Amino acid sequence: MVVQGNVLLAPLTTLKVGGPARYFVEAKTISEVQEAVEFARANNLPLFVLGVGSNLVVSDAGWPGLVLKIAVSGIEQREQNGKTFFDVGAGEEWDRFVARAVSANFAGVECLSGIPGSVGGTPVQNVGAYGQEVAETIHSVLALDLQDNQLHEMPAADCEFRYRTSIFNTTEKGRYLIVRVTYALTCGGKPRLGYADLKKHFVGWKETPAFSDVREAVRKIRASKGMLIVPGDDDCRSAGSFFKNPILSSDQYDHLTKAAAEKNLQVPSYPALEAQRKVSAAWLVEHSGFSKGYTSGRVGISRKHALAIVNRDQARAADVLAFKEEIQNRIEEIWGVKLEPEPVFIGF
């Protein structure tokens, strides 16, 4: 294990903001992860685990402790009791694993193509897009418990997956370090085509698209919205979707639709979580005065996606935070809805 000091974190994130880490370790094995944890504990250092920095906002002050980049790699495919499992290192690039599964004709993750990030981050937020969530395919998670410093194989049920949440970012936040994720995928079958953008893309197709067709389509759609990392594209200097789609009660939803009707607008939504409704955060942003391409100083809204706050010109984390709060306050004032941010914030 190599410990580095005073490492700038901004270059290690897609948003490109943030100060330095006091100490930094890139752990390529599970034993190095354990060693890094012991180093942090022995020196009484706060610990933060870094993936590929795609869903992260680092403060301008940086991180006062140890930043641990888990780089445990490897994709192993195995058969057990008639099922196919993929054991994937937490440091693997997520889209590389998706490409591997799709090329082998396995269903379950094709709609999650092009999402930036590491495999270890997918269970934390129950990553989802275009009608799929990783909760549907995660079989188990191997995690280091910081309370007893032991490795635990946790079945999916113990992770308590919900919309964009799990125990790893709610009830047990900060307790576990994920070092490997096991996915159970199905060979063959039909791809998931329930999402509107995908239906539109495949209109007129006479044959059922292959998993590779769906993967290509998803990547094209994501690229058109600035949600695919493309070198040189300043709309990609973001943390992805910055706000979660709010889930409203019936009363909240009625209040919103009435407010929209008074402006001759209709709120797009779809049923979610039984009696509640999930509403488009992008619609709320765009109908509150923040159109695509909107600029406020050194930050702004992506020209391709209303939910992406982008770093236009050497922005600081403070600029991003102020802009986030401006958007939240305006939407709450106009629509009575409080948007919750999706990225992880550290050092604030």
Image (cartoon, helix red, strand yellow):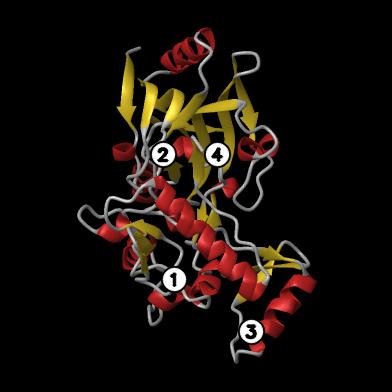
Alpha carbon distance from label 1 to label 2:
24 Å
Does residue 176 appear in this view? yes
- Asked if marks 4 and 1 touch (Cβ < 8 Å), the reply is no
Q: Which residue is mark 3?
A: 260
For residue 83, which numbered disc appears in the image?
Answer: 4
Q: From mark 2 to mark 3, how far is it between C-alphas?
A: 39 Å
Query: Which numbered disc, 2 or 4, marks the residue that appears first in the sequence?
Result: 4
Residue at 35%, 42% in the rendered image: 13
Q: Disc 1, disc 3: CB below 8 Å?
A: no
Q: Could you tell me the amino acid type at mark 3?
A: Ala
Q: Residue at x 51, y 70 (%)?
A: 285
Q: Amino acid at mark 2?
A: Ser
Q: Which residue is mark 1?
A: 198
Q: Is residue 34 left or right of residue 264?
A: left
Residue of label 2: 118
Camera-nearest label, 4 or 1 = 1
